[in-house]
Image (spheres, rainbow, N blue to C red):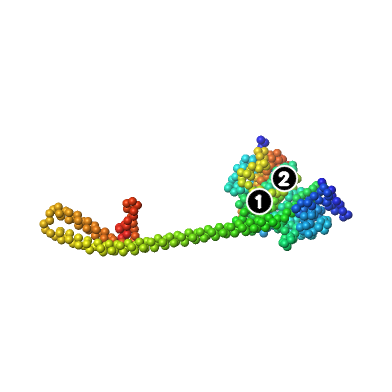
Amino acid sequence: MTTPEVNTKGITFLHSPHGYSILDYVSVGICVFDKNYRVLFWNKCLAHWSHVDASNIEGKNIMEKFPTLNSPGFKERIDSVFNSGPPVLFSSQLHRNTIPCIMSDGSYMIQKTVVSAIPSSEPGEFYALMAIENATELSRKVSEYRMLRNKAIEEVNLRKQIEEELREKNKALLEHQDIKINQERLKVLLEMAGATAHELNQPLMTLLGTIELIHMTQELPKDFSTYLNSIEKSARRIADIVSKIQKIRQYQTKKYLNDVSIIDFNESSL
Amino acid sequence: MDKVSISHEQLEAVKELCNIGVGRGASVLNTMLSSHISLNVPDVQILSSNEFRDELKSFAKDSSISSVSLAFQGKISGSAQLMFPTETASSLVSVLVDESDELDMDALRAGTFCEVGNIVLNGVMGSISNILGLTFDYSVPEYIEANPENFIQKPALNENSHVLLAKTRFTIDELDIEGDIALFMRIGAINILIETIEKKFDLL
């Protein structure tokens, strides 16, 4: 237990070889103050961070030296500790610091602080023990992590956007390619159809004309007449196909044998 | 195994204690934050450890649980926890510190959540302590994040422990979220709490 030291003003300090002075050897800023906010102990770490020696603050009101502790959200919460209330936590994100300490690079130290109740030398009374952790490095690392994370997310989003644009452009290119191929096919088809119809029409007209002349002959054997009708029927079918070829305006195919596709004259001439 | 029996009046008294506590917590939060926050406890129930396991699974859905834990010892011992699904806890922090809600629950944000939980739990424990005349020794609040399965593996939740579960509604500007304040206690401690409430509120 602590052996309190009482100075000439009757103020109890907490330096002793077996008491709070052991807290001079920890790398956490620690101070102890009573319910009047009078500092009873100020460890070496906090003295180093704040550039305020224990001799310059012990016995004095901590809020006069560090007014932050008197601001909304601080005093009201710390007061509960003197009634043996639960520890009070001040996070680095909401408060930045409780005891402003300027670091070697000129920036303010970011702190995480816990204020806990500890029994005082008077029964039923409590002191507040304020333990301050230097959270500057942690905050810096988290900020760096957030920047890297945001950058990674931005890059992923940009990559997704580029991939989507690429997909769209590729699709448009394929569609354009299809249109061009179909136009070329149709062009070749129309040239072929025109040539075919033209070349077939003349012999077909001769064939049909000749059949007509034979029909006009009076005395044809009965069998011959039957054969002639069959020839005429086929010739007229060819004439019908040639007519369809002449009307081709689009490229439509249909399945044929062995997975081969052929031009569908009916559909193509619609 | 011993059982806990609690009357409607006793539960209402516990609810009142919790509402006073979270009201104090909200008052402190409002002095610190730019967003206006209001807290209330619409429902309180006492659950066995098994019932709490089921409740926790349905509460968390597929998310992990973020919790601020405040252990206490005294005539009644146990731990008080403020719990949220982690995504909800993260949204709460985002609103309070005006940050993007796409951030992870990193160490800084966990620290902020821990402070909010500390304020709310201190309000509740302070209310229980002051009104019922009980004194406690407390541990430093800590942040715990675990999936529901691991969360309920904790030694604090064994067959002999019961949970006083207070549904807590946080309303912060446009955000309306619900968390749980859970007091983990052994059955004996719950019975002492009920007896103390009976005497204090003259419910005998």
Q: Residues within 10 Å of mark 1 (few under 14, many from 20)?
A: many
Q: Residue at x 27, y 62 (%)?
A: A196
Q: Nearer the viewer, residue B173 or A145?
A: A145
Residue that badge 2 annotates: B72
**Type of amino acid at the residue the image marks with label 2:** Phe
Q: Secondary structure at mark 1?
A: strand
User: With respect to residue B56, does A93 lie above or below?
Assistant: below
Residue in the picture at 61% in, 45% down: B148
> SS at mark 2?
strand
Left or right, A53 with reference to A236 = right
User: Which is more foreground, mark 2 or mark 1?
Assistant: 2
When asked about the image quadrant of residue A219, the answer is bottom left
Question: What is the spatial separation of the Cα atoms under label 2 and label 1, in whole angstroms?
Answer: 23 Å
Of the numbered discs 2 and 1, the one sitting upstream in the chain is: 1
Question: Label 1 belongs to which residue?
Answer: B40
Q: Could one spot residue B69 in this view of the protein?
A: yes
Residue B126 visible in rendering:
no
Residue A7 pos. (x, y %): 87, 53
Along the viewing direction, whichever of A210 and A89 lies nearer the viewer? A210
- Considering every residue shown, the one lying at the far top of the view is B1
- Residue appearing at x 44%, y 61% in the figure: A173
Q: Say which amino acid is labelled 1.
A: Asn
Q: Are marks 2 and 1 in contact (CB under 8 Å)?
A: no
Residue A121: image location, x then y, percent: 83, 48
Question: Measured from the top left, where is residue A258 in percent x and y?
Answer: 33, 51
Residue found at the far right of this picture: A8
Q: Position of residue A31 (x, y in %)?
A: 78, 53
Which chain hosts label 2?
A: B
